[in-house]
Image: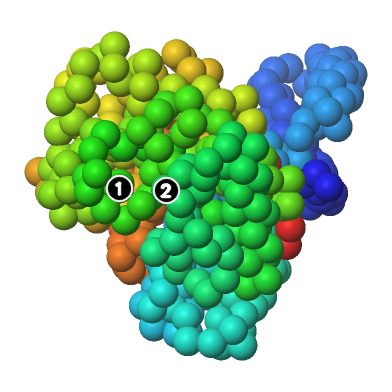
Amino acid sequence: MGKQLWFRSSGAAVAAVAVAGLMAALVGGSAEAGPAAGSAGAAGRRLALSAEVRNAAVARAANQPPETAVASALSPRQLAGQRVIYAYSGLTPPARLLSLIRQGDVGGVIFFAANFESRSQFTTAVGQLEAANKAATNPARDYPLLLMTDQEGGSVRRLPGAPVESEKWIGSRGTASGRAYQAGQAGSGAAASLLSYGLNVNLAPVLDVYRAPGDFDDQFQRSYSTSPQVVSTLGADFIRAQQQDGVAATAKHFPGLGAATASQDTDLEPVTVGVSKATLQSDDEYPYQAAIGAHVDLVMVSWATYPGLGSTLPAGLSPAIVQGQLRTRLGFQGVTITDAIGAGALAAYGSTQTRALMAAEAGMQLILASDSVSQGADCMSALAAAFRDGKLSGAAFRATVAQILTLRSSLRP
């Protein structure tokens, strides 16, 4: 069963409002001062012209995707908020987060093990977020929030449930058919688990090609294999199985953390992956070709630095990597998401606001503010200010939000 696309009536309504406003401006704001004797003829010409323009505008609106119309009607603050993934501590969504959601200032929420005590407690919390999202004050109320977690399998599972086995266990099965079967089972199991909790995005699978036993990925068995071909095949199997069951997949950590040593953790400190361009492209980026071929919904870009790819910036702050490698070289057309904006790897890059702006300028679409509601609000404020003053292109900003809304429209409410 493929993902279901849900009809969104609000987009047509927003488009109609936008057209009505345009017509009012055209008819009421285009009259020129002149002799009274010529006013009747000028008025007639204006009415004829406005009718033509109105008809053309209505025709365009009728063919416009509803997500584009919704994005065009959002305020700068709301546009910015739709690009931020928030987090909260404890077992109950705080009042501030619920208020932000009701105002249309939130794109999604990420959950961690500390947010979970029991199934009933957790699903109640998710229900509160969903109810806030449906508030009449939220212009994006017809679009489900992006509700996500890291349900990779093995030791990296934020919630009880499948997939139980790690990527390394899957990759070590004795036959290609056995590995493929287990990867598919893990993907469908992850989807079933998250859907049962009310979530719709998984920050998995990891597509890192690990290098040595006990290194960054292998110490927690987060990589399928040292073979790019095996990682490529199994990652795509996981993605297809999970997404066909209705949960968006996220391939990570582009362009790859497989060469990172055990002590190189971008959550804690700056990391440089000193691998050549040829190796990065032939080995580390290789699994993303299959993931893109499997129509993966999201790609998470790492915070490591890759001088071999011609950049001294962390990958998620680097246009050369986000735009040059991921978009242009590999042709990814889905949604990009950062790793945690509060990561230690970004310590040298200023405040939360500065980091969020740099990530957006590099081409990152969703900003993962995984520390607190306040951190998410800081990201929103920075993006809204950059939209207002033109540091970020208004047209590109609205297009990004429309793309995010399109992803949300494909997910089950």
Q: Nearer the viewer, residue 1 or 302?
A: 1
Q: Secondary structure at mark 1?
A: helix
Q: How many marks?
A: 2
Q: Nearer the viewer, residue 236 or 92?
A: 236
Residue receiving disc 2:
168
Q: Tell me where residue 383 appears, x and y as whole percent.
A: 37, 45
Q: Amino acid at mark 1?
A: Asp
Residue 97 vs 235, above or below: the answer is: below
Residue, x 65% and y 45% (percent of image)? 181
CB under 8 Å between callouts 1 and 2? yes
Dot 2 alpha-carbon crowd within 10 angstroms: few under 14, some 14 to 19, many 20 or more? many
Residue 87 vs 28, above or below: the answer is: below
Residue 312 vs 95, above or below: the answer is: above
Residue, x 55% and y 81% (percent of image)? 122
Report the coloring of the rendering. rainbow
State whether residue 108 appears in this view: no
Residue receiving disc 1:
218
Q: Amino acid at mark 2?
A: Lys
State whether residue 185 appears in this view: yes
Position of 378 compared to 314: left or right? right
In the rendered structure, which disc, 1 or 2, sits on the residue that comes first in sequence?
2
